Image (spheres, rainbow, N blue to C red):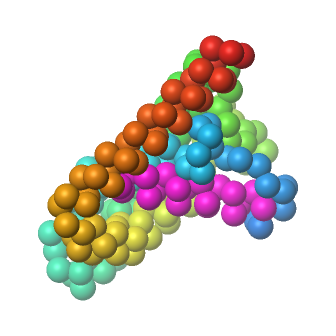
Amino acid sequence: MIYFTLYSVFGWIYEVFLEVVVYRWGYADRGVLFGPYCPVYGFGALLFLLLVYPLINKKPYKERLNLKDILLVFFLSMLIATALELATSYLLEMIIGYWPWQTYADYKINFQARIALSPSIRFGIGGVLFLYVLQPLFEKLTDAMPGKVLRRTSLVLFIIFMVDLAATVITKLILK
């Protein structure tokens, strides 16, 4: 739950950074929930941890830093994140009537304006940064936490997330 929350918040920050700094569109809340997080990034991170990280994390850190492993992490991250983005776009459109990120209609290589090559490449780069830089750092931080603190923190984060999810469902779907 801690990793899920951290990466959901990082995803939200990344999305807002793109909107404000890169595209200069101004601030817009990039999440579907009320809190400052994008759960799709949290789920993507969990998928990376389950499907990609085991391929490299058993190796000593210096042995991971070879072109073959970096390219493998890049392409697997790119594929997993793109598949998740596509599936999430269909799911959110079915549930709330739209997907909350920009359409990729203006991108040269796209599929149904839901996914595009350029963001997929960024997802691959992000996966490499995530698995080689952020995750080892977060593991050091969480490993340093006593088990009781980890469990309580995870429980509090889970409760906050579930309350936010319930509030979102009630206000955006039921009271719509």
Occupied quadrant, residue 56: bottom left
Q: Residue at image x 33%, y 62%?
A: 72
Q: Main secondary structure of the magenta part?
A: helix
Determine which quarter of the picture holds residue 118. bottom right
State the extent of the magenta-drawn residues as a range.
1-20
Res. 139 in view: no
Q: Indicate whether 88 appears above or below 130.
A: above
Residue 156 vertical position relative to residue 96 in the rendered view, above or below: below
Q: Where is residue 14 in the image (x, y as percent from the top left)?
A: 61, 61
Would residue 158 appear left or right of 92 to someone viewing this image?
left
Q: Does the magenta run of residues contain 11?
A: yes
Q: Is residue 19 magenta-colored?
A: yes
Q: List x then y, in percent, for residue 2.
A: 35, 55
Q: Point out the residue furthest to the right here.
A: 25
- Residue 155 shown left or right of residue 78 in the figure: left
At x 49%, y 52%, the residue is 8
Image quarter in which the C terminus is found: top right
99 or 146: nearer the viewer: 146
Q: Reply above or below: 172 against 117.
A: above
Query: Viewer-proximal residue, 128 or 156?
Result: 156
Tell me how many marks there are. Answer: 0
* Residue 167 image-quadrant placement: top right
| Residue for point 17% across, 61% down | 147
Q: Indicate the position of residue 136 as horizontal and vertical percent values.
A: 30, 73
Left or right position of 15 against 125: right
Residue at x-position 57% and y-position 23%: 169
- Work out whether residue 160 can be spotted: yes
